[in-house]
Amino acid sequence: MSTLHPEEPHASHSCGCGTTCGAGPSATVVPPPKPVPEGVPVFRIPTMDCAAEEGEIRHALADLPGLRSLSFQLGARTIAIDAPAESVQQALDAIRKAGFNPVPLSEGAAGEHSGHDHDHRHDDRGLALPEGLPRYALALLLAFGAESISFFAPSTLVFTGLGMALAAAAIGLAGFSTYVKGLAALRNRRLNINALMTVAVTGAFLIGQWPEAAMVMALYAIAELIEARSVDRARNAIKGLLNMTPEMAEVQQADGSWSDVLVKTVAIGSIVRIKPGARVPLDGEVVAGNTSIDQSPVTGESIPVDKAAGDLVFAGTINATGMVEVRVKSEANDTLLARIIHAVEQAQGSRAPTQQFVDRFASIYTPAVFALALAVCLLTPWLMGWTWMQAIYKALVLLVIACPCALVISTPVTVVSGLAAAARRGILIKGGVHLEGARKIKAIALDKTGTITQGKPKLVATEVLTGGPGESQVLRWASDLSAHSDHPVSQAIAQGLVREKGGSQFNGFTALPGRGVEAQADGLTLILGNHRLMEERGLCSPQIEARLAEQEAQGRTVTMLASSSQVLAIFAVADTIKESSREAIAELHALGVTSVMLTGDNVATAKAIAMQAGIDDARGNLLPEDKLAAIEALQKQFGCVAMTGDGINDAPALARSDIGFAMGGAGTDTAMEAADVVIMNDDLRRIPETIRLSRKTQSILWQNIALALGIKAVFLLLALFNGATMWMAVFADMGGSLLVVFNGLRVLRMGR
């Protein structure tokens, strides 16, 4: 989905499982999510926000004729139904029968607007169904009243009737939506939390335990409310960044005057003025003025970055010093910050491996305990001498204990918190599977230029060889040809020879990935490329090799300009290593991760840079297919291997690696698409940080699973041996759920 929809308040429970279980960069670094195809209706379902409820809806629509596809966005609580018009209406009827209320987005009123419209500034912490709290509080008071009558009042018909009436009112206030969903599940012969609570509360009421039934339902509803608030906090933590973009922008009018207008109405190409201390309203390019920008909402780094004419600025960042004028390059719903948030939402909707395991386990656990409860009800009067009332009561207690709330919520809240924490630190992880998988990394391959080094090499030596065209002509060709390439080395040559630029007319310009570029000019075929390319063309003589060896021994990257018959000039470019690279490699080694450099540069330069950075192994003269083969070899040697890069030539290796890290600042769209994790600020230290986050997340995941199952096991035994009441069962179930939720939310602290 390409828009964010703020969560609308609603009073029903958060999920069919009893929880809300879910599942300086370039301006184009984060590709926009795939939009719903035009003409496909999208509906908002306020009470759908977890995989269990998605499963309920999929099951309800399983036999729908003409259904082409369903697209769920649990974070936004929406579903897109791709089907003929008559089938869509049947689908809506089936969804309503399952206990849900789908609302067309076009009719959503308060709910239907883009997250970029800033109409949701009530803050995402207000998403936890505020109007439900008074009703649930009243239900709790009525339940206390029923309990008091049962305990203190004489057992007369009048007091009994009054107590039952109060209990029934409490159950109705707190559990109406639970009953609607529960009865729908029972009709469809499916066991979920709502079905279990419906049977347990109804059964307790019918056998005379009406005060307990009322209290259980009221406590369950309030606990659900608390869970919904907690899980929404995790799921929507990253959305808070949207509140950093201002609602208004100062826009230049046609007559040259300035006027404040709504950000969502500002068109691409407009000029906006940003004063010191103000936040940047939209992505754009500085056209006048100089300033420093705090880019922490995008990169996670608060160190200001200097900006001048021609530099890009991003929505939500802070103008620290001077006034600047900026030409808008993207609309409000297509800023880099919005794309980051969309991408995190997409990732939150995916199911991590541990979550898939837990969901499968819960699908077995719940029917198994239901069968155990049925066996207790029918067999214990014969086998253990219990009365039928005792047996039924114990069976109902078991039903409450059977609720898989804590177990199912144990994974998604932790994974979602981890994804949000990473995004706050400028690490965009494209799914829970990659968050969990990062802990397994044993080796990491790194590209050199722009990843380990600054990616801003400078031309340090130029040599025009004799026996060819004149020096000025050769330098003009080199200047103009290098300007046609976006490779950092070519750009360094172009900048170093900017005075030689002569406007050469090129034909048949061809990029040679991993080698260089080729074109025709002035009747000649000209080649600008690396050592490998010249060797392939048979242009490297012993004299040329000697000159190259001299430059490469100094750790310089050598590029040559040649015709089809001879080398015309040699250009030496030097790059400097990032300070953060040394620290990152040291941290990776401390985590037990082996580092390997894979570069298309010459071997001598690769080894020189690797030695400076402390990298274990360096391999040079690699084409894209060579990098791909190197990744496969490393996987055989180490197992889980990551790849880090930023260019088109890194994309195949990024895609083949177990986890691909793309550097977001200098990276290409191709690399971003192929990668699993995007480092928004080009800081390699974010990679060991990701591994530590992954390990912490996995630790908390298994803590939560152990807590959930441990609490269930204890109270299961207590229930079988007369040690647990229904009160205790609901406290154990909801207490366990809250415990794992709050434990999972601890991961958010790592994003600070």
Image (spheres, rainbow, N blue to C red):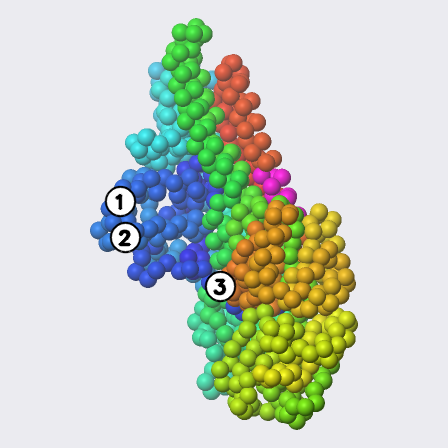
713 displayed left or right of 614:
left
Q: Residue at x 44, y 36 (%)?
A: 17
523 displayed left or right of 751:
left
Q: Residue at x 63, y 52 (%)?
A: 634
Mark 2 neighbour density, 10 Å: few (under 14) some (14–19) many (20 or more):
some
Q: Nearer the viewer, residue 196 or 567?
A: 567
The disc label shown at residue 31, or none: 3
Mark 1 neighbour density, 10 Å: few (under 14) some (14–19) many (20 or more):
some
Asked whether disc 3 touches disc 1, contact meaning CB atoms under 8 Å apart, the reply is no
Q: Nearer the viewer, residue 716 or 155?
A: 716
Asked whether disc 2 touches disc 1, contact meaning CB atoms under 8 Å apart, the reply is yes
Q: Which residue type does callout 2 highlight?
A: Ala
Position of residue 740 measured from the top left corner of the image (x, y, whole percent): 56, 36
Position of residue 534 measured from the top left corner of the image (x, y, whole percent): 63, 76
Magenta residues, dominant SS class = helix
Mark 1 = which residue?
A: 64
* Callout 2 secondary element: loop
Mark 3 or 1 closer to N-term?
3
Position of residue 431 measured from the top left corner of the image (x, y, whole percent): 52, 50
Q: Nearer the viewer, residue 47 or 343?
A: 343
Residue 734's place in the image compared with 443, above or below, is: above
Mark 2 or 1 closer to N-term?
1
Mark 3 neighbour density, 10 Å: few (under 14) some (14–19) many (20 or more):
some
Name of the residue lying farthest toward the left: 86
Q: From this viewpoint, is residue 21 visible? A: yes
97 displayed left or right of 30:
left
Mark 2 = which residue?
A: 83
- Residue 699 in magenta? yes
Q: From this viewpoint, is residue 320 visible? A: no
Q: Residue at x 37, y 48 (%)?
A: 45
* Callout 1 secondary element: loop
